[in-house]
Amino acid sequence: MFKLRNFVRFLLVLVILLPIGAFALTTSILKDVHNKDLNTSSLHDKSHMHADGIKNILVMGTDARPGETSSRSDSMMIVTLDSVHNDIKITSLARDTFVSIPGYGKSKLTHAYAFGKEDLLIRTIEENFDIDIDEFAMINFQSFMAIIDSLGGVTVDVTQNEIAELNKFIPETYSWSTNKDKGPMKLVENAGTQKLNSYQALSFARIRHNDSAFGRDNRQRMIVSSIMKEIKDTSILKYPMILRAAAPYIDSSMSPTNMIKIGIDALRIGTDNIKQKEFPLVDNPQYTTNGIYGRHGWVIRYDPVSTKFLKQFIFDDIDY
């Protein structure tokens, strides 16, 4: 039998890993997360690679600012619940990946959502990488900050060369915060391991121009890891508050029933064996080329042959 404390804690971890969460405590939270208006009809087309016991959830973060009605997909991950090999896999998809977007020709992967919302993004990923997506979840900046506010901050290691770029974003992210107790705006003054509040952490996650998009992906994973640690150290009494703070900013294709099933499957697998990868293979010049490409700007071009490594990782548990 699972202990209730471990069950609820694990579901909270899923709020961060899968942003589908909030399915543990109340029906009202489940209904808040499930968005019937999402266009995810492509999820029903099972013409690409799939396997029993393996569920792929596309988790997307948008770069929409408060009040904006259109945006690009700022971050994209395929979260794989693998009951065959008993692990969870997180595959980051680089936003600048040069792909064929159905009906729009060649462009960056991040543009698919701007062109045709969630359904076109799903189709683009399925058709370019030959992987069936089973479910979809979307999280925005407010959810990110609401979770961190509920936890009282996250701890990360800020390097000296990140401070200027981090502080550049803080005035904007500070203005987005809905935390009434946020106090006066505070910049990050020193390098080193330190606790960042919600708007500082979001600014840290947005840093890009002082290294690369891949550096930003790494910083985002650092914050996710810190959030997971904070959750593990948080009293169970704070769990409902954290879930309710995040739920209004999360939209998912999953029905409450599916959320519960996925949560139970993930609970059985556990979080001790989480594997992470990034695609395209940015460190392998044999399969990937980065740089300016005509009118498309800076893109990541990949050899279609390399998608076999992505599929081997997701379906066969083979590291690449």
Image (cartoon, rainbow, N blue to C red):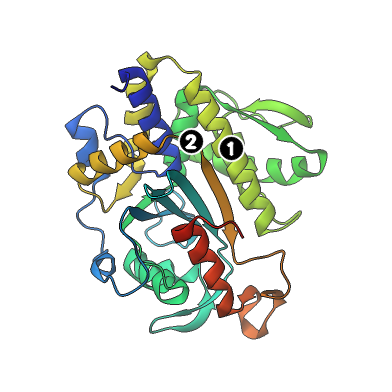
Residue 54 against residue 267 in the figure, above or below: below
Q: Tell me where residue 102 sits by quadrant.
A: bottom left
**Nearer to the camera, 64 or 16:** 16
Residue 243, horizontal then vertical, whole percent: 34, 30
- Amino acid found under the numbered disc labelled 1: Ile
Quarter of the image with the C terminus is bottom right
Quarter of the image with the N terminus is top left
Q: Which of the two discs, 2 and 1, sits closer to the camera? A: 1
The Cα atoms of the two marked residues, 2 and 1, are separated by 11 Å
Residue denoted by label 2: 145
Residue 20, horizontal then vertical, whole percent: 34, 43
Residue 189, horizontal then vertical, whole percent: 76, 30
Q: Tell me where residue 244 sits by quadrant.
A: top left
- Amino acid found under the numbered disc labelled 2: Met
Q: Of helix, strand and loop, which one carries label 1?
A: helix
Residue 253 against residue 249 in the figure, above or below: below
Q: Badge 2: few (under 14), some or many (20 or more) residues near its Cα, within 10 Å?
A: many
Relative side of 301 to 253, left or right: right
Residue denoted by label 1: 223
